[in-house]
Amino acid sequence: MDKVALHQKIDRFTVSPCGDVSTFSEEDQNLIVIPSGFDLQLGFKYAKNLLAEMHNVRLIGDGVTLRHVWPAWVANQGRLLLTELGAYNVWNIFEVTRELRLDIKQWLDQIFKGVIPGIDGNSIFYGSAAQRFLQPMLQSFPVLIGLVERHGPAKYYCVDDKWLGFDQFKILVERTGGSLKVLESSRKQLWPAKLWPVTFVMVSAVVLILAVLDQLNWFFKADPSRKKLRQLRQSQAARPHPRLWVALIPDWLRINRHVLDSVALPKIKCNEDIGILLLGNLSPGLRSEANMRAHVGNELWPGLGELRFHLEKCIVDQVGTVESLAELFTVLFRSIVCSIRIIFKLANSSRQVYHGSFHVDLSKCIIDLVKLITKDVFNATASEYATRAVLKRYNFKQTRVVFCGSALVSESLADLFLQHAGATTIDLLHGTGALFWIGMEESQASMRGVWTYHDVRAAEMFGSKAVAIGIPWGFVSRSRVINRRVRNILISSGYAHLGTVIQGCYRFVPFQNELIEVVKLIHGVFRDRFCFRWRPHPADNKSFINKTLESVRNVELSRNISFAEDLTWCDLLISSVSTTLFESLFASVPIFVHVIPFLSGHPAVANFDQSRCFFLANDLLTPFTRSISQLDAGDPEALAPEEQTRLTLFGSVDKPATIENCFSDFETTGTFKNV
């Protein structure tokens, strides 16, 4: 652990409302922690109360240093410090969570023992458990370590004890000799300890019934897909079995695109045979980014994109669900039996889990936990039936199966069964995550295809084989005229993404408002020279987008436009850390990166020139003005920072590599080698 880096980062992301941090006394210091996703104003409310009692207070939370979130009374408070929660994250997240993740997996093995014979429970259910309720705990654990490492035996306050990581934090604090108190308990004995068994069984019974109805609903909706599959199997029965398969989600185009554009479509264009394995449910329509259970339209398998027009050239099958009523009722019966067994096992155990370093109060995540032991048990059992059927129809020895993702229940099970049948499975990752690939991003695949060299090193830390393939689909590098007058500025963000919701709250929205603040500041200096367009993530909450838009003028919202079109339109990009940020490195435009404290020091971000990175909107003005001057003057070094970042991350300043090169190496030598 780098204690020096920890202290430096905390100092960097700490502010005093009175303007002078040095005057703050850490004696009698009270630390109020606002967990990620909780209301910042709760923290300010309790800070005010403690200040009235003449205590020194350090308020810690995501976004507390941003002036636009401060109540009016905060100004000139000399006994108050504000520190970003993400400032305490300096550790290698893989190393610091190693013991915790192992203990979680052992706990899952006990819970799900025997659900799928011959396969450990954690191998199938770990990713989904993380997605449903454990991911925030895994990601916050390094921050908790940083808090106790920096402040030692201090007086800690937590704004609310419904936070899933509260028990974990309490134990860490007590080990240092400190104390942790709750400022407000919103739970108010919602699930009294004495009534835990009865409460858990009742909630589980309701969710179990709803899960059964859900399975029936999806089954009957998928009838057109089953008919289509039967037709395709009959017409393709005499065709040779392909050596390359792609595993795709039939109703979700965005999540498949990297596999489609880098693997499937290039093979189709070369008239080579491939197989398609459909994952998940087979309901018609395109999955809504705003509501993952909702579908738009009635088209079959729109998630396959252009590939759906070439199905006659492919072998098509599915590994996600059952295809007959007999199979459905068999799966339902077997799943219900397994679920009931797990329900009573947990009901007869304490709601407080103390398994090694894993500590959690299950009553705080009761609904998500019950979904895991009911809905996900159904999904696993259905996927087992479907995958066994596929293995009887085709020979997978010495084949490759490229997954668009293989971490969740159905995908993990299919992946493991295919490996056992002799296939090499490749989890082709979307985006770059490096040391944040824990929990719901961990995979059982034979190997991982990743974007950058630092991603390879991160994957290897997990014990995975990995190959750097570059961006699977690349924007063609533009021969941009350097002295072209900069006019169009694109802002890209994902701070209101559904995936950032923790216990019902959007943790990063304050940072979204700070990012958009750059429009006002740039306009104040350059007046009406620039046109601004804002591109939120497709899965961003629209109400937060609209509310932020109300605070600025003359900003066009990108609607129904592809990212490639937006990138072609712009002359300069200002972006949060996201997948699109790395794709943009090949667009020949200057890129300024909004780096929030939690990501500061992240290996991927560290590869960007620091003159291109900023946190507070005010910090952008000087480097932005300098870049505009360079571009206006036609300076050949104007895009040098982007070229260096491409070289470091991808090993190329020209264009991204392609997975085809990797497959060629595999076919020639039997092994993958990094591009």
Image: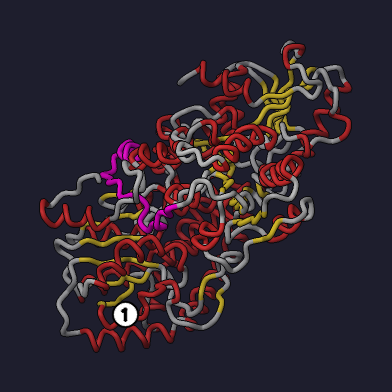
Give yes or no for residue 472 being in the magenta stretch: yes
Give yes or no for residue 130 being in the magenta stretch: no
Quadrant placement of the N terminus: top left
Q: Which of 307 and 232 is in front in this view?
A: 307
What residue would you read off at disc 1? Answer: 310
Q: Which amino acid does label 1 sit on?
A: His
Determine whether 618 is above or below 654 in the image: above
Residue that appears at 28% across and 67% down? 266
Determine whether 543 is above or below 524 in the image: below
SS type, badge 1: helix
Q: Nearer the viewer, residue 281 or 266?
A: 266
Give how far across and how far down residue 245 sits, in percent: 26, 67
Within 10 angstroms of label 1, few (less than 14), some, or many (20 or more) residues? few
Left or right: 568 as drawn, with respect to 519: left
Q: Nearer the viewer, residue 130 or 635?
A: 635
Give how far across and how far down residue 139 sits, in percent: 52, 39
Give how far across and how far down residue 154 sits, in percent: 67, 17
Give how far across and how far down residue 626 sits, in percent: 60, 34
Q: Nearer the viewer, residue 644 or 313?
A: 644
- Colour scheme: secondary structure
Q: Is residue 449 visible?
A: no
Residue that appears at 33% across and 70% down? 319
Residue that appears at 67% across and 46% down? 512
Location of residue 324 (image quadrant): bottom left
Location of residue 394 (image quadrant): bottom left
Location of residue 170 (image quadrant): top right
Q: Which segment is the magenta one?
A: 456-479
Determine whether 620 is above or below 662 in the image: above
